[in-house]
Image (cartoon, rainbow, N blue to C red):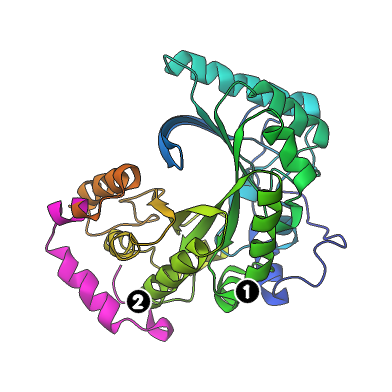
Amino acid sequence: MSKPTPDVYEQGRGMDAHNQAMREIRSRKDETYDPREPTRVWLDEDNTPDGVYDSLTIILNTGGCRWARAGGCTMCGYVAESVEGGTVAHEDLMTQVEKCLAHEAENAEDPAGQIKIYTSGSFLDEREIPAETRQAIAETFADRDRMVVESLPDFVAEEKITDFTDHGIETDIAIGLETATDRVRHDCVNKYFDFSEFERAAEDAADAGAGIKAYLLLKPPFLSESEAIEDMKRSIRRCSDVENCHTVSMNPTNVQRHTMVEELYFDDGYRPPWLWSVAEILESTVETDAIVVSDPVGHGSDRGAHNCGECDDRVQRAIKDFDLRQDPSVFEQVDCDCKLTWETVVERERSYSMPLAR
């Protein structure tokens, strides 16, 4: 991996100790990636303000998140999958899009109504996705109903979003807020912006005719299970009160390669959240105005949100059912003896002596 060289944008942001540690961790990466191949592509269903849509999810391989190259977030290893050199040519990015369309044609009877496009950083950062590419992608998908693109709030600007809304596409900007608590975002996630910047981005998106989807992180490092649950409940309610934020996606932390979380995990200093915690939070926040969903990555594995191993798939199916129906009664249909262990962890685990159970 090329040695990060923070420019003016990154200087003075985040915690120096975090950034230094994560630059060292990420320097161990030795894989290389083809700039003409997307990182991932898949078909799925999503609950939106306009109902449930078939979705084509695209993760473009770019030059990587500029914040991650300076050090970045404690849990995010996506920059390790990015192309060397910091940039990818417009032609190569469009080749990636064409391959994703080919995947859709081979695996779906009809084109998906919703397109979700992610990078390892911010789609609206023109160092990752040039304006020329953004405009070409907007034209490519002008016949679809909905579009979701992800960005840090810094890069959210009306003139970028209108590339999509001017085509009549219902557009959402997904922002990796992680938590509504500034101290947790700064100290546990090492993300530099404040909640007020998220609110400003929501206003700018509204001016462009777009909505906001908040991405929250369940159980960043250094929080106990109970602290993580309570922080998530507060964050969901606070996000749902932000005008124009219609969806909150709760993402349980999974242990990704080349991250500080992975270092803690191997030193017995971190356990991903319990799936019971996900269910508890979804049940407790169903009354909010926002659509609240969760899609635990790597559920049931040691590196992903998990329970005892026996009930993981059943609880995951209930979570997926909740995402589409927003009906908390789905959780009444799943139970397991390990729920008592989870309840004990929530009651007794403390952040200075965690994890209490693996």
Residue at the spot x=69%, y=76% of the render?
Answer: 17
Identify the residue position indicated by label 2 in the image.
Answer: 226
- Disc on res. 139: none
> Dividing the picture into quarters, in which one does residue 349 lie?
bottom left
Q: Give the x, y percent position of residue 91.
A: 78, 23
Q: Give the x, y percent position of residue 335.
A: 13, 58
Mark closest to the chain's N terminus, 2 or 1: 1
Report whether 89 appears left or right of 80. Answer: right
Give the Cα separation between the discs numbered 2 and 1: 19 Å
Tell me the SS state at disc 1. Answer: helix
Q: Give the x, y percent position of residue 4.
A: 78, 56
Residue range of the region highlighted in magenta in the rendering? 330-358
* Crowd around label 1: few <14 · some 14–19 · many ≥20 (10 Å): some
Q: Give the x, y percent position of residue 123.
A: 69, 43
Q: Main secondary structure of the magenta part?
A: helix
Membership of 251 in magenta stretch: no
Residue at the spot x=86%, y=60% of the render?
Answer: 7
Nearer to me, 49 or 89: 49
Q: Amino acid at mark 1?
A: His
Residue at the spot x=64%, y=29% of the render?
Answer: 168
* Crowd around label 2: few <14 · some 14–19 · many ≥20 (10 Å): many
Membership of 342 in magenta stretch: yes
Q: Amino acid at mark 2?
A: Ser
Q: Is residue 191 above or below residue 83?
A: below
Tell me the SS state at disc 2. Answer: helix
Report whether 144 appears left or right of 138. Answer: left
Q: Is residue 296 visible?
A: yes
- Disc on res. 186: 1
> Dividing the picture into quarters, in which one does residue 280 lie?
bottom left
Q: Is residue 255 above or below residue 132?
A: below
Q: Is residue 27 visible?
A: no
